Amino acid sequence: MFSKLLIANRGEIACRVMRTAKRLGIRTVAVYSDADVGALHVALADEAIRIGPAPALESYLVAERIVAAAQSVGADAIHPGYGFLSENADFAEAVEAAGITFVGPSAQAIRAMGLKDAAKALMEQSGVPVVPGYHGDRQDADFLAEEAANVGYPVLIKARAGGGGKGMRRVDGAADFPAALEAARREAEAAFGDGAVLIEKYLTKPRHIEVQVFGDRHGNILHLYERDCSLQRRHQKVIEEAPAPGMTAEVRRAMGEAAVRAAQAIGYVGAGTVEFIADVTDGLWPDQFYFMEMNTRLQVEHPVTEAITGIDLVEWQLRAAAGETLPKRQSEIAIDGWAFEARIYAEDPSRGFLPATGQLTTLSFPEDGVRVDAGVRQGDRITPFYDPLIAKLIVHGPNRSTALARLENALRACRIGGTVTNLDFLARLAAEPDFRAGHPDTGLIDRSIDRLSAPPVPNDAALTLAAIISTGALQPDGSADPWSSLGHWQIWGDANRNIAIEHLGGRTTVALAARGRDQFAVHTGAAALPVVILDRFADGARVEISGAQQEFRFLREGEQITLFLQGDTYVLRLPDALSAGHASEIADDAVSAPMPGIVKLVRVRPGDTVEKGQALAVMEAMKMELTLSASRAGVVESVLVSEGEQVSAGAVLVMLQPESAE
Ligand code: ADP
C-alpha cells in the first residue's frame, strides 16, 4: 500500500478521500490555491502545498504544478477526485511518467471513453447496447439528415466531444434539422474546438441509470449495482438513489453484465461508472436501456453505493491502484436497503438557481444516522471560484419509503445561514408525489419547477417570531427585554407597535404589544396571538404561540433575520425597526450589503468626497432596490465590488478612509 497520497482536488471530495487514506494509515497531502489557504481539506491533511492563485486554470488544473508538488513531498500516489484533472489522460500519463501511481485507470482507457462517437462504436463492437443512431465519421449535412430520418424523429444531435449538455439539440422533424445541426455544430466548435456530431434517437421518457464498476490489475472486473440519477435539472444530477426504483432481477443482471463488458473492452482498472439511458415509456425492460457514456473516475454520488453495499469505494480504488486484487467477488456483494444522496448548493432556486457566495455564519447538520460529506465548516466562505457545493447528505434505510422520509427530515434539519441554499427546493423535491411513488424521470423537476423553486412564504408563526426578534427580547440574557431595560422600548409602554417585515413574497406589517415580562400579543392578521417566551439559547429560543410550543433558531445580521423554523429557512428583513439607531451605533468605515443581492449601481470612485447620507451604491435584493448611503461624511478609500456582481450579506461594498486619516 502507498505511504503518502496527494489529493489533487479540494472541497468535500478531498476531505472524503483523506478520511479513508487516514484509516488505512496513509499520510495525506493537500494542494491548495490562494482562495483555499484556510480550507477544511488543507486543515485535515498531514501536509499541504500551495499550487497557485484562486482561478482553477492557474491552480487545480495545472498538471505540472501538481506533479511537482507530489515530487517535492515524496508522495507515491495521486488521487484526482472528480472534476478538475480526473479524466485528463495527459495528466494520468504525466503522473505515471514521474514514477507516481495515478489512482485511476490507464491514460489509454480514459482516452477510449473521451469521445462519444468512438466510445459508442467501441461499445457496439463489444456487445453493449447503444442508443440507436449514427455515430460514424461522415459529417456532411445531407447525409446526416438522411440518417436522422432513418433513426426516426424526434432525434438528438450531440457533440461527440460534448459534456455538460453543450452542443446538444433535440429535433422534432426533418424541416428543423438543418438549422439545428448548424446550431449544434457552432456551439460544439466554440465549446470544444470540435464541431463533429452524432445523431441519436431522442427518448421521450428517459431515466438515467448508471452502474458502478471496478477492475483490478489482475483482470478482475465486477459491478456494485446501479444508481438512479434521473432527478436532473439542466442535465445536472440533483438527488441520486441506489438501487434504482422498479428494477427487476432481469434488468439488473442485463445492465450489470453490459457494464462489466464495457469495462472489459478497455481493460479497466479502478472505479468507473457506466451510464445508461433507459426508455421507461412502458417500464424498465432488459432490451430498452442503452450505453450513454463511461466516467473513468469516482462519481459525486458514489456514497449511495457505499451505503447499500457497505464497501468503501475509495479504499477499493487505493487497493486496486496499489496492485491488490479486489477484496470481494461478485457473488459476495449484496444490496442492503436503500440510500439517497442530495447535493446541497449555495444557489438561489427562485432566481434560476443562480450560484451564490457568502460566509457560512451558521452551518449545522443533523447527526443521527445521516452521513454528511462536507468540504466546509461554519465560518468558511463559499467563493465564486469553484463549484458552490456545500455538502452532500446521504441517508440509508431498510426500504425506499423509509430512506426517502429520512432524507426529507434530514434536509429539514439542516441549518445554513450566511448564503442562500437549495435546501427548501431539495426538501420539497423529496416530498414530490411522482418521486415518492418511485417514478423519477429526467423531466420530473422541469415539470414542477415553479412550485419546487418558489421561496417559502412566511407563515403566522414565522412573522410573529420575526417581530419578537426585532425587539431584541430574545437575547440569551434577556437584557434587551422591553420590560427590564431602558431604551427604545420603554417609551412604547404597552401600546401596539407596527413592525414591517419584508420577505420574498412582499411586505407584511405585524402589530406587536408587550404584555408583561416575556409575554406579547401579536397580530399578523385577524386575531391576536398570545406569545410567551419559555427559554432562550445562544442561537434561538423556545416560545409558546397560542398554546403550541415552537423551538427555533435564528441569526440576526443588522436588518436581516434568518429564521430556521420547523424545517424551513426564512430570510426576512426589518426595513425600519430600530435600524436607524442601530446603524448609527455600528457606523464605521465600511458600507456593507445588508442582505445577499446583486450590485446594480456603484455611484462613487476611490478618492470621492461624500456627504453623510449620500447614496453610494444601489443593490437589488429580494426583488427590491436598496440604496446604500454613507453613514458619515468622508472620503472613499476603495470600492470592492462592480456592477452586476452577486454579493452576500455583510459583504463590504465601499470603504471610507478612516476618520483620523482625513
Ligand atoms: P453530456 O456529456 O453533455 O452531459 P450525456 O450524453 O451524458 O451528455 O447526456 C446528458 C443527459 O441528457 C442525460 O442524462 C439525459 O438526461 C439526456 N439525454 C442524453 N441522451 C439522450 C437521448 N438520446 N434521449 C433523451 N435524452 C437524452
Image: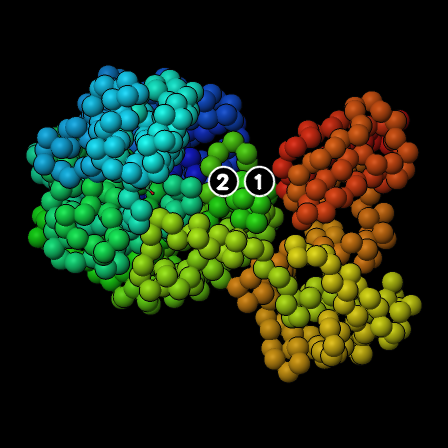
Instruction: Identify the residue at image location x=32%, y=32%.
Output: 174
Instruction: Identify the residue at image location x=71%, y=35%.
Output: 600
Q: Are marks 1 and 2 in contact (CB under 8 Å)?
A: yes
Alpha-carbon span between mark 1 and mark 2: 7 Å
Q: Is mark 2 within 8 Å of ligand 1?
A: no
Amino acid type assigned to the residue bearing label 1 in the image: Thr
Where residue 499 appears, as percent x and y from the top left, is 79, 63
Looking at the rendered structure, which numbered label has been put on residue 28?
Answer: none
Image quadrant of residue 283?
Answer: bottom left
Image quadrant of residue 437?
Answer: bottom left
Which residue does the numbered mark 1 point to in the structure image? Answer: 357
Which residue does the numbered mark 2 point to in the structure image? Answer: 388
User: Depth check: 271 or 226 in front?
Assistant: 226
For the question of whether residue 368 can be seen, the reply is no
Q: Residues within 10 Å of mark 2 (few under 14, many from 20)?
A: many
User: Depth check: 522 or 310 in front?
Assistant: 522
- Give the left or right position of residue 60, taking residue 459 as reference: left
User: Depth check: 301 or 37 in front?
Assistant: 301
- Give the left or right position of residue 379, taking residue 148 as reference: right
**Height in image: 240 above or below 216?**
below
**Height in image: 122 above or below 566?**
above
Task: Describe the element under mark 1 as helix, strand or loop.
Answer: loop
- Give the left or right position of residue 546, taking residue 583 as reference: left
Where residue 256 appears, as percent x and y from the top left, is 14, 47
Where residue 82 appears, as percent x and y from the top left, is 34, 35
Task: Describe the element under mark 2 as helix, strand or loop.
Answer: loop
- Ligand 1, by image quadrant, is top left
**Height in image: 126 above or below 423?**
above
